[in-house]
Amino acid sequence: MKHNIKPRLLLLMVLLFGSFRLSAQSGYSLQQLIEAANKNNHLLAIKDYQVQEKVSKLKEDEIKKYPSPTLDGNYQYNFTLPDITIPAGALGAVSTGNGSSQLLPAQASKFSVGQKGSYNVGLNFYQPILQQFKINTGLAIDKTDIKLLQKEKEKTALQLQLAIEQLYYGTLIAQKQTEGETAKLELAKAKLYDTEGALAAGKTTKVNIAGLRADIAGQEQNLLKLSIQIQDYLGELSRLTNLSIDGLKLQEAEPDKTSLNPIDEYKSAASGNPDMEIARLNKEKALLGIKAARQSNLPDFGIVTGYYVQQGNPILPTSSPYVGISLKWNLQDLFSNKQVQNQRLFQLKQAEETMAYTKRQVDSDIDKAWRKIKQSDALILSAEKLVGYRKDALKEQLDKQAAGLDIKTTTLEIKSQLAEAEVNLYAAQLSNAIAIAELENLTGQTK
């Protein structure tokens, strides 16, 4: 028993430490936000149910391929029945052997036909033959509808993912901009402090004081605008992920190190773009619609079989199986289906134009995203160079401070310039990440 105590204590400590680590998590990563959206978003749930609805419809239509059983029956009570009268001698006469003859029948006979109460119960089966072609085409259309909804769900998921990425990076950029504006505010306050000291010594005027106070108010206003922008971004993230906005904090994002492939590779991969797939499936559905319209010209021909039981009609057997054929052909359909075919042809033309338009639009969007990545790469290099220079300037100023040659406002000004350069670098890096996300989104890539 004593040997089991230590392992249990160790296990308890591990669990407590693990829960502490989880509670100390700094915030949600981009991947966690995307996973939460995929799990909790109502639009995706709606698309799931729509797919299930179409799958159920496919199963319903598959049943039409097989024999259709019909159970019918009726009961009838007749207040009067017809009579059949056989006159005397209607069947001739026979000799009796004594020189006389006997009429057949000897006297007129009267019979009632049927019974006042009669019923009929039957089980019928109808197996369509020629309609099998149209049924199979209808099933192909149902399968195409399922694929269309699956692609629409995939499109919704990609749009949701891109929206979260844009909001995530936009929030981080705004938070970084807050740091830069805070540094500018500290600088403005330091300048005001120095100017107020100079005013007390009679070395400046109140005009300068008012201008500095206006600068401080302007910086505070900028901070307020950024705070409102961050709240709006977080509120939108909360709506998309169904997470509480109160505890919605974001982890810092590392600069995207994704290597860029040649643009032609992305255009080739764009065949997996949901919009391209939807356009292709719509064309396929239009072709199937034309095929179904032509098959509608066929008559409804099939085999009928069954078994019936009846009582009350003496002419028919009380029970009997039967088999036969059925043919129905609405000749008016030959004319109306011609117009249906024309409608399907126009739908096909629309689908072909949509495919061409979508291909051109996706290629244009890929070109745009590609340019944005290249532009942000150039901005990153420029911003990195500026940050390096600002750091060197701050080091020189700190060296002067160590030598007693420092002016506080000068140091704060250089720190403010460095903070602004770092904000620009961070914004360029995250703008690059957004552009890469847009490019991957256009090729149908998910995270």
Image (cartoon, helix red, strand yellow):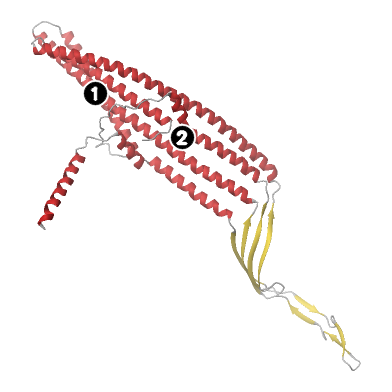
- The picture places residue 68, in percent across and down from the top left corner, at 59, 58
- The picture places residue 297, in percent across and down from the top left corner, at 67, 46
Above or below, 329 relative to 421: below
Question: Mark 2 or mark 1: which comes first in sequence?
Answer: 1
Q: Is residue 104 visible?
A: yes
- The picture places residue 71, in percent across and down from the top left corner, at 59, 64
Tell me which amino acid carries mark 2: Pro
Q: Quadrant of the C terminus?
A: top left
Q: Residue at x 46, y 25 (%)?
A: 264
The answer for how far apart the CA atoms under marks 2 and 1 are is 38 Å
Image quarter for residue 215?
top left
Neighbour class for label 1 at 10 Å: few (<14), some, many (≥20)? many
Above or below, 296 relative to 392: below
Image quarter for residue 21?
top left
Give the residue at mark 2: 274
Q: Residue at x 15, y 12 (%)?
A: 397
Q: Is residue 409 visible?
A: no
Are the residues flagged by discs 2 and 1 in contact, CB closer than 8 Å? no
Given residues 401 and 205, the one toward you in this image is 401
Q: Is residue 155 left or right of residue 378?
A: right
Given residues 147 and 242, the one toward you in this image is 147
Give the residue at mark 1: 178
